[in-house]
Amino acid sequence: MESSNLLRVAAFMRDRESAASLSAVSGAMSRARFEIYSGSLAQALQASAAQQSPDAVLLEIDPQEAENTRDSVSVLGEAFPGTPVIATAAGAELEYTRLLMRLGVLDLIPQPIEHHELLSVLDDVRRRAKRLTAPHRPPSRVVAFLKAGGGCGATTLASQTAVTLATRRTQKEPEVCLLDLDMQFGAAALSIDLDDRVCLNDLLEARERIDGALMRSVMGHHESGLDVLAAPRALMPLDTLTKEFVGDCLALARAEYQTVVLDLPLAWTAWTFAALKQSDLIVLVAQLSVSSLRCVRRQLQGLQEHGLGGIPLRLVLNRNDRSWGAASRRREAEQALGRRFDFTVVNDERTVREALNRGVPVAKVARWSRVNKDLRRLADGMALALAGGSEVLAVPPKASGRVAMSEAR
């Protein structure tokens, strides 16, 4: 891209009328120069051969001609290797949009083309080019949220703290993403009111050509700046994912984002182990119950036995009761586990339920509430740990029989 930041776009339109319409919309853009061609793609490419290689390509397509779309995108990929392709069409349905994603198309602009739509997509092209040419940045970090039993609120904590981290970003482009890898019961996107029609399934369908552009295209974009990869809407077997696929996803997410938050299922599989192994911080979420404490013990011992004990870990007590005697019960639980809780999040069911029902961060429901303060404190602790704080916590002693808060000491 030129030092003046002038974006060169080669536009291939189906007829003169479409070309004239695009010319009218793009004419007022001072930061982009369009070279517009109409007619058959082969003739247009021949006419454009003498021009300087573009920074982006805009292609008009017909949703009723899927095979022609495949061929056209393939031809453009050969003619302009590495150049982002933007599509424009009228009446494109969701399945056709998914096809474009699998083909590697950066974005789809609906017709008639609006000035603000075109401007927004071109800004994405500029940001993409800037990332590719940017100087070395600090290494990306991965935070894995691990559950100590079902219903402990780990997904809520993962989404809420990810939103908090995203609001603190220093760059204009998204720096934080949340990958909901709970294949069967994931609800991270729903918890902050994001559309989950495009989700993890779309990456699976395009696993042979997954790249950073495709990953960003299937993300839901929250107003805080957080990008979310939604879990599948329908139940899927856990072995649908493989450790190779998850490894590729994490590598791409690290390349595209500064902080990657994972919401993992309760079950241990080969690919969840691979995800944990690549994490820089594990956040284990528990409740103050015998069953949850049993699960904490098993999770901690499992991490140690599988060679993951060296990864920094923070133990979070969620839905912490502040009633009389609660502090004593928490101390008994810590004695039973052989370690302390690093963070507690107060039990404020009313505020959290309202936030989930409205699909907004807790801060928008009750900014000065104790639960929001606890969530901010947890986000602060995560950021501090990712910045270099490494703490290897002791594995709790093995105990025979029932784990009880008043017994296993």
Image: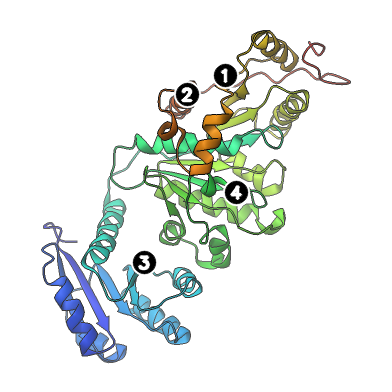
Label whose residue precedes the other's in the sequence (1 or 2): 1
Residues under numbered marks 1 and 3 in contact, where contact means CB atoms less than 8 Å apart = no
Note whether residue 48 is visible. no
Quarter assignment of residue 11: bottom left
Q: Which residue is mark 4?
A: 181
Q: Quadrant of the C terminus?
A: top right
- In terms of secondary structure, where does tag 1 sit? loop
How is the protein colored in the picture?
rainbow
Note whether residue 163 is visible. yes
Label whose residue precedes the other's in the sequence (2 or 4): 4
What separation in Å lies between label 2 and label 4 (alpha carbons)? 23 Å
Indicate the amino acid at tag 1: Asp
Q: Which residue is mark 2?
A: 381
Residues under numbered marks 4 and 3 in contact, where contact means CB atoms less than 8 Å apart = no
Residues under numbered marks 1 and 2 in contact, where contact means CB atoms less than 8 Å apart = yes
What separation in Å lies between label 1 and label 3 (alpha carbons)? 43 Å
Q: Which residue is mark 1?
A: 342
Front position in the image: 124 or 56: 124
